[in-house]
Amino acid sequence: MLFEAASELGAHHVKVGDFFNTPCPMPQLIEAFTALCKEASNHGTRIGFELMPFANIHTLESALELVKGTNASNGGIIFDLWHIVKLGIPYDSVARFPKQYFYGVEINDGYLKSPPGMDFREETTGHRKLCGMGEFDIKGFVTALENSPYRGPIGIEVLSKELRTWPLDKTVTTAYRTTREQFG
């Protein structure tokens, strides 16, 4: 049903990830991702895997191994700044990721170190910040992207308990303004 919706809506990609870090050998991950890419190709869409700190795929090397292993022209990686910062991946390393597997970018802001008593899952689903309202070097990330081969969409992804209480018009106008300020 999701692939049919993506096809009808002309979606750039369908994003998938691993939130549970259940141990799984890479050949099995590659086999499953290959099958998912094949199914998606039947609907004319692409699959973007998002590497995360709480996932099996949490390094650039393992992400590249996954997408190269599929040998699928419609499988790639999504780079979410929150995860990049938490994983300690240098921005210039992301910028050097091979173009054919670089499917998308999401920017946001947050804490450089998780506040005491807050784990990654709680922080990522309830305490992200709009761009410029946290501690990340978003402009540094955007500058690194300018030196990369990636020229696709850049979205924002801010999962926040605070924003869920805001009226829609305030959320939209603030998100637009704070995101726009990160670009030259």
Image (cartoon, rainbow, N blue to C red):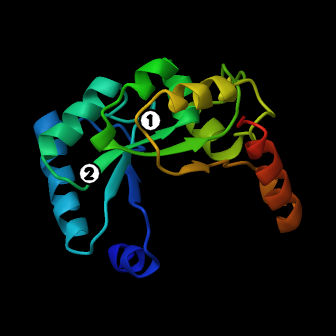
* Residue type beneath disc 2: Gly
Q: Position of residue 75 (x, y in %)?
A: 26, 51
User: Residue at the spot x=79%, y=33% of the render?
Assistant: 132
Describe the element under mark 2 as helix, strand or loop.
strand
Mark 2 / mark 1, whichever is N-terminal = 1
Badge 1 crowding class, 10 Å Cα cut-off, few under 14, some 14 to 19, many 20 or more, is many
Q: Position of residue 145 (x, y in %)?
A: 52, 31
Image quarter for residue 180?
top right
* Residue type beneath disc 1: Met
Which residue is identified by label 2?
75
> CA separation, marks 2 and 1?
17 Å
Compared to 125, does 171 lie above or below? below
Compared to 111, does 51 lie above or below? below
Residue 52: image tag: 1
Describe the element under mark 1 as helix, strand or loop.
loop
The answer to whether the residue labelled 2 contacts the one labelled 1, judged by CB atoms less than 8 Å apart, is no
Compared to 173, does 138 lie above or below? above
Q: Nearer the viewer, residue 12 or 83?
A: 12
